Structure formats: structure tokens, C-alpha cells
Image: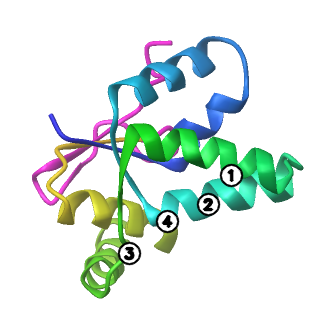
């Protein structure tokens, strides 16, 4: 099953405990991430966590080694804008969902979006921490 990963799941790599272990498992399984996810991770790591640029680069390098990175394109933007309206998603979440759809994913792992929601009849949102 082709899987996309949301920013909030990967940010748990920075911590300890059950959610960090789940995030490491998700990373080990691989999948895809949108450039949007890399941008959001960079912002959170710099502004909220206070990481230096070297630390951010190392974290993003780890993610990029394990995940296929997909571009934000005009087509992804158009799909994302429509999804934001239809499903009442934030624009940023909609771009991640659109990247998953455009790239043929069947599931999107996210802690913040509605667990079990099926987008466009083919992409299921799953909270990987629901059982943790």
C-alpha cells in the first residue's frame, strides 16, 4: 500500500516514548513526503524547537534517505485548493493530501487530520498513534 506521511508524524522523531517509536517505525517503512512536509518540518524545527541549521539538515537528510520526496506542482496546487474547499482542510494540509492523491497513495498517515476519513474515494487518513 503506497503511503504518504504528514509533518506531524515525522516531528515525533525528535522525542522519546511511544510516539517517537511509532515515528521511527513509519520512517523505516518508507513512503512519500511532499516538499510541503519538508518545508513545515524546517519551520517547526527552527522556530519552535530551536534547532540549528546543521541539525535541521541532518533530520531532513534522514527523512529524504527513507522517503520519496514529491514536488509541489501547479497540478498539486489546483487539486489541493479544491480539496481545501470540499473537505474544509487547511491549505497546507490540503497540499499534503493533494500530493498523496496525485502520486497514487492509498493512505496518508496523520495525527491531525480526521482518522478514517476517505478523500476522493481512494485516500484513507490514518492516525498511526491511535493504537499507541
Around disc 1, counting alpha carbons within 10 Å, would you say few (fewer than 14), some (14 to 19), or many (20 or more)?
few
Residue 85 - label: none
Task: Determine whether label 3 and label 2 are within 8 Å by CB.
Answer: no
Of callouts 4 and 3, which one flags the residue occurring earlier in the amino acid sequence? Answer: 4
Cα–Cα span, label 2 and label 4: 6 Å
Q: Main secondary structure of the magenta part?
A: loop
Q: What residue range appears in magenta?
A: 110-132
Cα–Cα span, label 3 and label 1: 20 Å
At a point 30% along the width and 64% down the height, the residue shown is: 99
Task: Determine whether label 4 and label 3 are within 8 Å by CB.
Answer: yes
The residue pinned by badge 4 equals 36
Element at label 1: helix
Around disc 4, counting alpha carbons within 10 Å, would you say few (fewer than 14), some (14 to 19), or many (20 or more)?
many
Q: Is residue 20 above or below residue 77?
A: above
Q: Nearer the viewer, mark 2 or mark 1?
A: 1
The residue pinned by badge 2 equals 40
Q: Is residue 34 above or below residue 58?
A: below
Of callouts 3 and 1, which one flags the residue occurring earlier in the amino acid sequence? Answer: 1
At a point 71% along the width and 31% down the height, the residue shown is: 14
Around disc 3, counting alpha carbons within 10 Å, would you say few (fewer than 14), some (14 to 19), or many (20 or more)?
some
Relative placement, left or right, of 37 versus 84 is: right
The residue pinned by badge 1 equals 57
Whole-percent x and y of residue 121?
10, 53
Can residue 126 be found in the magenta stretch? yes
Q: Report if residue 88 is visible in the image.
A: no
Q: Residue furthest left?
A: 121
Can residue 55 be found in the magenta stretch? no
Element at label 3: loop
Amino acid at each position: 500500500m503506497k503511503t504518504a506521511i504528514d509533518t506531524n508524524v515525522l516531528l515525533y522523531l525528535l522525542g522519546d516514548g511511544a510516539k517517537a517509536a511509532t515515528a521511527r517505525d513509519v520512517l523505516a517503512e518508507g513512503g512519500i513526503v511532499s516538499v510541503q512536509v519538508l518545508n513545515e518540518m524546517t519551520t517547526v524545527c527552527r522556530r519552535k524547537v530551536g534547532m540549528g541549521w546543521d541539525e535541521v539538515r541532518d533530520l531532513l537528510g534522514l527523512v529524504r534517505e527513507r522517503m520519496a520526496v514529491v514536488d509541489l506542482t501547479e497540478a498539486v496546487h489546483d487539486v489541493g485548493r479544491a480539496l481545501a474547499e470540499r473537505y474544509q482542510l487547511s491549505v497546507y494540509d490540503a497540499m499534503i493530501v493533494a500530493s498523496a492523491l496525485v502520486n497514487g497513495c492509498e493512505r496518508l498517515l496523520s495525527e491531525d487530520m480526521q482518522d478514517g476519513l476517505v478523500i476522493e474515494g481512494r485516500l484513507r487518513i490514518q492516525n498511526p498513534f491511535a493504537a499507541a
